[in-house]
Image (cartoon, rainbow, N blue to C red):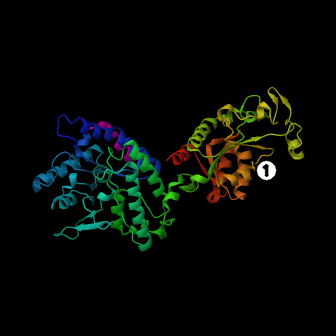
Amino acid sequence: HLNKTQPEVANRGWRDYGNRQGLRRLGRMFNQLGIPCTAVVSGDLVENKEVMSLLQQFKDVNRWEIGAHGANNSNAGHSNLSLLDETDLILESLERLGVAFQGDQPKTWLTPGFSVTDATPMILEESGVKTLLDFVDDDVPFELVKEEDPNESIICLPYSMETNDFSLVLTRQLSPREYASALESHILQLAKESYESGTPTVVCLGMHTFVAGTPAHAYELDKVLRRLSSQGNIKWATANEVTECVRSGNAKVALPQDLATVDPHVDAQKAGNTLCIQAKPSALTRIDRDRVGLLLIDFQNDFLCHGGFGEMLGNDPSKLRRAIQPTKEVLSSFRRAGLPVIHTREGHRSNLLDVTSLKARNGTLIGSDGENGRSMVRGQWGNNIISELEPLPDGSETVIDKPGKGAFYQTDLELVLKNLKIDTLVVCGVTTEVCVHSTVREANDRGIQCIVLEDCTASYFDEFHKVGLEMISAQGGILGKVTDSKSFIDGLLR
């Protein structure tokens, strides 16, 4: 409690903020990261319909487990209760939550204020609870066996104060960044020990919605959890999933030989510069923030606007314009992050001497007069990049003029990338199956990784767009990776 005055405006408002905003914020973050959670809920919270609805959504959609946390966290807990009173309190809490969640009674329990008694584990086991979070022992789950009947037991998971936001933030007064860093160091050390010994360890990250769920703490947590998610020998699970794993004897799931293990001896500075992106075909793609650039291919009036070269060929330019808005958002995120941006324009000299004979035969309209000037000629309206995505006027963004479909053909793009030390390109552009595909193939042959954003690319033909993207990510990503703008921005900004 913050004070003893009544009403306790500060304390009530602080905790209510956690229920109203912190829970949503943490829920969004864990959903984006694909991390399942166990929410230990006080029985009295069933009266809050808004929170219960949100928890039900997380349970149904995001694989959350609902555990029990007694009646509330404001009374004296269990320590002074008789056996009968404690039994009644536990049963009432479990039943209230079971009814609130459509008969799904909690199987995980955390006693309020760690006021566990000698009788608590026995009462819980007899009430159907499978997992207890009240004890900390050696960073591993253990079985608490009933003395009268060795066949009856409950699994205890280590709930450490070293990873609890109350202890780290409120007691030790760590800053948001220090708090998140402490969690990362704790987990990486356990991962290192597991990696070396072949024995899995378990850690519970105790978070309160009104502490970890505040903006600054959530911001720093997100960055740390993304980095940890990229470690091959770290697995996220609910309390019940860990217990089932222990019961089944399948605890080896977290061992390095069962996973695409990354060496846990992590350089902290390097890890801090790693972006973790959800992309096909792999679940998670790791890229070095200092070596990534954005490549915007041929967002020109000639292809996306009325009266341009594309329309002169009989195509519908509106089919390409759907890529503009998501590309604008990606471009803005790169600019805010201070990362390199490169634009390309396909066009030719005014005398057309850089047009190959084959291209001239197949593209008889190149250089022809249209309502907005000569098509596919540098310096003309059609060659300009559309206003929504035009380069910054200060010249800080590179513009590559290319005479062919691929951005590397007869250009200095490769030299530009080398000087910028870029080994990964985030690719947006038109059209998917022609200039984007040609460029991705050229980059792949040069050892440059491409991550193509599916909603930031487009074609005049829907089927070509679909198949073009499938070809890029086929056979384990033979040409590159494919994701969408939201997934990439989520990884970039955290």
Across and down, in percent, residue 458 comes to: 67, 41
Residue under label 1: 409
**Residue 364: image x %, image y %?**
87, 38
- Judged left or right of residue 155, residue 403 is right
Residue in view at x 68 percent, y 35 percent: 393
Residue at figure coordinates x 48%, y 68% from the top left: 258
Q: Is residue 20 above or below residue 104?
A: above
User: Is any part of residue 463 visible from this angle?
Assistant: no
Relative to 51, say whether 275 is above or below. Answer: below
The range drawn in magenta is: 48-61
Q: Residue furthest bottom?
A: 197
- Report crowding for label 1: few under 14, some 14 to 19, many 20 or more residues within 10 A (C-alpha): some
- Residue 304 at x, y percent in the picture: 71, 34
In the depicted view, which residue is nearer to us: 335 or 193?
A: 335
Residue at image point 61% right, 53% down: 291
As drawn, the residue found furthest toward the top would be 371
Q: Is residue 163 visible?
A: yes
Under mark 1, the amino acid is Tyr
Q: Main secondary structure of the magenta part?
A: helix
The outermost residue toward the front is: 394
